[in-house]
Image: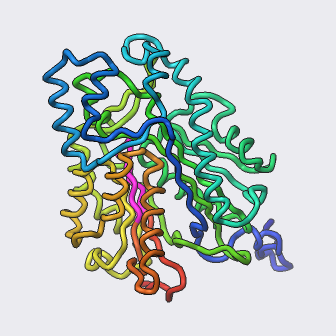
Amino acid sequence: MPIANGNGAVRNSHRSMQQHAEGPAAMLAIGTANPTGVVVPQDIFAENIFRVTKSDHLTELKEKMKRICQKTGIDKRHFHLTEESLAAHPEFLDRQVPSLDSRIDMADTAVPELAQCAAIKAIAEWGRPATDITHLVFSTYSAWQAPSFDHQLAALLGLRPTVCRTILSLHGCYGGGRALHLAKQLAENNHGARVLVACSEITLVCFGGPDGGNLIGSALFGDGAGAVIVGAGPFTEGERPIFEMVSATQTTIPRTEHVLGMQVSGGGVDFHLGIQVPMLIGQNIEKCLLDAFTGFVDDPSSSWNDLFWAVHPGGRQILDNIDTELKLEPGKLAASRHVLREYGNMSGATIIFVLDELRRRRKEDGDNLLLPEWGAMLAFGPGITIEAMLLRCPGASPLNNN
């Protein structure tokens, strides 16, 4: 606590000085997971969804869905919900029929268990026991009860009873960015803290028969979970920072709350995805990046191509608009496009898959490092909310400050 000296001036006690970490937070380990239930190739998704929902008679709508699927840039997606489960829950097909309780019951087990799979991988890579985790941040759009999935995951992993838990609910596609932003603050402001970030998303809570209002969401979203161990210095022996988390901001684009959002109803979660979303993100992305980089880089806008990019692949058009607005060279968003192609949009968990893909590419490239020293992470979601973070590959010289 602050202690006054003889002249009345305030000085910090030794204990309070120890409250803060040394240097910026860093990602120390990454794990990802997908459900083993169903893998659906995108080119047959429309046929599948109309068949299992008994909607084949809606021929015009099915053809429209096929055209949307062809333009997504997705090859396949993973799903927890199987045809057998759907047969046992016919109420999922009609959004006017109450089904929220059944969806919650299924998610209550599936969501934390999928998060556990990703977290176990991250903890194993980290190399320290799970009991060394001091904080847990869990993000999902499937949580409506207390105690919630953060409590369940802590029990599944055997975390200490003193672990500080936070649940982020219904943040949607920016949930992973928000969780990492919060983890950065926790790690840097609590000496010795090690934060487990877990994002787990399964589409069964929003699954329904196709109608004219949900075709885009049905064609984009898949299931997955990601986990990241975040900590700041001093690092223990064996801890290897993957990406330093230098600076982070959150921006809400004014008057866009009607454009992108989620609403919980008796029939599950309804997604609203306005066609303006890619345009609005493109128009505002540079300003958000400049805010995140202020005080760290002299003129980042003159060298966007000098960075590596971890961008949430909310959809192919969003990535295309960012490419255009920032005048990025071909391949700058390759990791994001790869994740979109292999998994679809897994909401908040997706950005962790992109970070893992970037890490994998850097490792495979060996001494000829594919990634530049500095990078930007971006995630987007309801609001419209944009999370931006300045990243740095460790082991290089400090930034050129203003």
Specify the color scheme: rainbow
**The image quarter in which residue 71 lies:** top left
- Please tell me which residue is depicted at 53% across the width and 72% down the height of the picture: 244
Range drawn in magenta: 377-388
Quadrant into which the C terminus falls: bottom left
How far across and how far down the image is residue 161, in percent? 81, 46
> Does residue 37 lie above or below 15 as drawn?
above
How far across and how far down the image is residue 60, in percent? 13, 23
**The image quarter in which residue 156 lies:** top right
**Which is nearer the eye, 57 or 173?**
57
Q: Residue furthest top?
A: 97
- Please tell me which residue is depicted at 73% across the width and 68% down the height of the picture: 191
Q: Residue furthest bottom?
A: 397
How far across and how far down the image is residue 263, in percent? 41, 27
Q: Is residue 84 left or right of residue 166?
A: left
> Does residue 91 lie above or below 280 as drawn?
above
Numbered circles on residues, count: 0
How far across and how far down the image is residue 275, in percent? 21, 40
Q: Is residue 397 left or right of residue 146?
A: left
Query: Was residue 385 drawn as part of the magenta stretch in this picture?
Result: yes
**The image quarter in which residue 192 lies:** bottom right
> Does residue 238 lie above or below 173 as drawn?
below
**Which is nearer the eye, 265 or 204?**
204
Q: Is residue 327 left or right of residue 16?
A: left
- Please tell me which residue is depicted at 36% across the width and 67% down the height of the picture: 309
Magenta stretch mostly in which secondary structure?
strand
**Which is nearer the eye, 332 or 288?**
332
Q: Is residue 331 left or right of residue 170?
A: left
Query: Was residue 97 drawn as part of the magenta stretch in this picture?
Result: no
Quadrant into which the N terminus falls: bottom right
